[in-house]
Amino acid sequence: MNACGAIDSIIKSIKDNTTLPGHLPALVHALTPAVQAAQGKPGDLPANAIRANVAMKVDRLKTTAPILKAAVDDNKLRVGGGVYSLKTGRVDLL
């Protein structure tokens, strides 16, 4: 299982219908799509949300940054993502 305090807090905030303090609502806004995409899928919700977030960010980098998109489209650049485990020090590539 991966651990991410931000994802864990967002899952709790969504479940409890609460608003996190300070600047955290911006983080909630950015990560909520990944949590929603992971809900209802088999396995560990936080781990699935982390992986969904990485996949979404990779897709965003590949399609919304004009310079990167052109390089990806021309097969001059590959954009990939990974999940780093604080516990093991291992990176799992997606």
Image: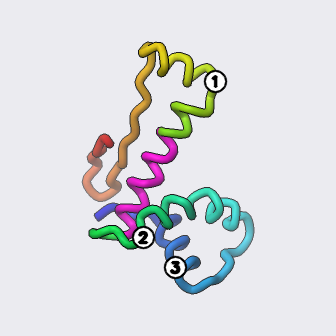
Q: Residue at coordinates 42% horizontally, 61% vertically from top-left?
A: 49
- State yes or no: residue 66 in magenta: no
**Which x, y percent locates residue 47?**
35, 62
- Identify the mark nearer the N-term, 3 or 1: 3
- Identify the mark nearer the N-term, 1 or 2: 2
Q: Quadrant of the C terminus?
A: top left
Secondary structure, mark 1, is helix
Check the image and tell me how it is coloured. Answer: rainbow
In the figure, residue 69 lies in which quadrant? top right
Secondary structure, mark 3, is helix
Viewer-nearest residue: 4 or 86: 4
**Which x, y percent locates residue 43?**
27, 69
Q: Disc 2 residue type?
A: Gln
63 in relation to 55, above or below: above
The answer to whether 66 appears left or right of 92 in the picture is right
The answer to whether 31 appears left or right of 2 in the picture is right
Q: Which mark is residue 66?
A: 1
Mark 1 burial class by Cα count in 10 Å: few <14, some 14-19, many 20+? few
The answer to whether 48 appears left or right of 63 in the picture is left
Q: Quadrant of the N terminus?
A: bottom left
Query: What residue would you read off at disc 2?
Result: 39
Magenta residues, dominant SS class: helix
- Identify the mark nearer the N-term, 2 or 3: 3
Q: Residue at coordinates 69% horizontally, 60% vertically from top-left?
A: 26
Q: Disc 3 residue type?
A: Lys
In the figure, residue 20 lies in which quadrant? bottom right
Q: Residue at coordinates 49% horizontally, 59% vertically from top-left?
A: 34
Magenta part of the protein: which range? Answer: 45-58
Badge nearest the viewer, 2 or 3: 2
**Disc 3 versus disc 1: distance between alpha carbons?**
36 Å
24 in relation to 60, above or below: below
**Disc 1 versus disc 2: distance between alpha carbons?**
31 Å
